[in-house]
Amino acid sequence: MLTLYEELMLLALDDKEGVVVPQAREPLMMGLASAILTELTLRGKLRTDEQFNVVVANPMPTGDALLDRALESIRTLPASPRPATHWIEALVRGMRDLEDQVIQRLVQRGALRIEESRRMLFFKESRFPQGASGFEENIRRRLRDVVMGGASPDERTLALIGLIKMTNLIEVVFPYTEWEQARRRIDELTSPQAAGWPMHAQPGYAPQPEPATDMMGGLMPVLMFSMLAQSMFWGTGGWMMPGMLGAPAPQEPSFGDGSLLEAGNANDFGDGGGFDFGDFGGES
């Protein structure tokens, strides 16, 4: 079974061209970070308290290298619990070549294949079209059954629906003739009210729960991170600026910028070294 972040990456890649679709280019990193946090929540590794802080519920490793690095960082870095918005931003900044690492995993699973070409003799260009494994077809079928067929979503499918909404992938997953209906249904499924979370945030601010709300009740666990990321991303009119959530900006941001999909980086998957959270672990 693919993780949420692998499923999201598959949907964000153009099946034939093998590059990230234009509309998902900017929000994808935040979407992948949200997918990692959501995956950890679904596996019972994270929970949130009444103050909306992310807390480690089970520190035992998952066996997934990316998930375990994120889990260990959340467990060890802060002197006190931090809110979900802090960790979304920290993962975006601290992940090293995340897109490249996820693509490598998908190639190894057979969900993607590598096509290399030369440009101007000197530059090697790599693209990653869909493989022959049927992974993406199964994902799209699952989404379609819920969004267009009216089936009740399981938690994992609901989480993915929230993620495709925040990364602008509705128009990629569904054909033009179904866009309007798909948007309506997805808005219903991912609304704050459906999640049991009255949201009255102004643009650019993370919504706050009502006092004494059980944040692990209802659908909140599977929608929380994608809803927060959407508020953070679109509330600032696009990509987050350094330090917008109060954390000091690292001098040299180390998260990937999709370099694997650009010329000259055919097989540069990075060192797999995980995360460099820099200043995010200390008190702000």
Image: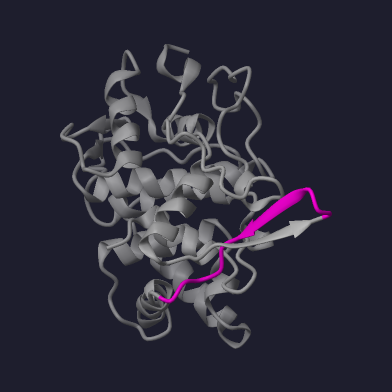
Say which quadrant the N terminus sits in.
bottom left
Can residue 191 be seen at all in this image of the molecule? Answer: no
Q: Residue at x 62, y 41 (%)?
A: 257
* Span colored in magenta: 120-132
Residue at the far right in the pictured view? 120
Q: Position of residue 28 (x, y in %)?
A: 56, 51
Q: Residue at x 58, y 80 (%)?
A: 180
Q: Position of residue 233 (x, y in %)?
A: 59, 44
Q: Is residue 277 left or right of residue 55?
A: right
Q: Is residue 120 left or right of residue 50?
A: right
Q: Nearer the viewer, residue 98 or 40?
A: 98
Q: Nearer the viewer, residue 73 or 63?
A: 63
Q: Nearer the viewer, residue 265 or 87?
A: 265
What secondary structure is the stretch in magenta mostly built from? Answer: loop
Q: Position of residue 259 (x, y in %)?
A: 64, 44
Asked if residue 135 is positioned above or below residue 210 in the image, the reply reads below
Q: Is residue 176 left or right of residue 112?
A: right
Q: Position of residue 89 (x, y in %)?
A: 50, 33
Magenta residue check for 56: no
Q: Residue at x 56, y 68 (%)?
A: 129
